[in-house]
Image: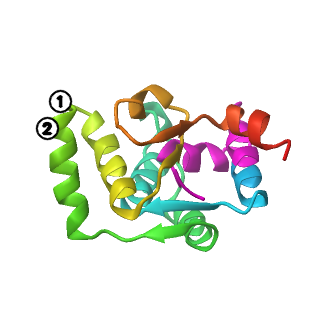
Amino acid sequence: MDHLADTNILVRAIEKHHPSGHHARNALKVLRRNGDRVCVTAQNVVEFWSVCTRPVARNGLGLSRQQVARHVSRIDGLFHFLPDVPQIYEEWKRLVRAQAVSGLQVHDARLAAAMKVYGVVSILTFNVDDFRRFPGIDVLHPETVVEEHGRR
């Protein structure tokens, strides 16, 4: 089964001392151990770069571009990449209209659109409520993945 990793999973997974970092890393390990494939989009990587290079005072990680480039190389090696295709834009327009999406949640709608286009039905995220509005998407919290799927 394919799962999309939300950007917050990627960010938390590199934060060794953040309380959620352990959950993100463990959930990714459990999914892979169960034979599942974890995917990312260009949008995930762009958002990851933005958060990681943004100053801590502005809710970022304050990492150097070189540090983030190393993390992105690791992401490229660990995750299956879903490239941008024109159908994502068309699906995004359909979703934002159908679900009355506005503001920052338009970014979540674009991830949902990519999932729909590629047939990915599950997203791993800490922001469970942000994706529940999109039909056909199974929203997984990392702690739930470890608790429910880690026993297989």
Inspect this view and state whether residue 59 appears.
yes
Q: As drawn, which residue projects farthest toward the right?
A: 151
Q: Residue at x 49, y 47 (%)?
A: 6
Instruction: Tell whether label 1 touches label 2 (CB within 8 Å).
Output: yes
Residue 104 drawn at (x, y percent): 27, 34
Residue 36 drawn at (x, y percent): 66, 60
Task: Specify the quadrant of the image occupied by residue 9.
Answer: top right
Residue 74 drawn at (x, y percent): 62, 68
Task: State the extent of the magenta-drawn residues as a range.
Answer: 1-27
Q: Is residue 123 above or below residue 139?
A: below
Q: Residue at x 86, y 42 (%)?
A: 151
Residue 108 drawn at (x, y percent): 34, 41
**Disc 2 to disc 1, how far (Cα)?**
5 Å
Q: Which mark is residue 19?
A: none
- The residue beneath circle 1 is 100
Q: Is residue 143 above or below residue 63?
A: above
Q: Is residue 13 left or right of residue 94?
A: right
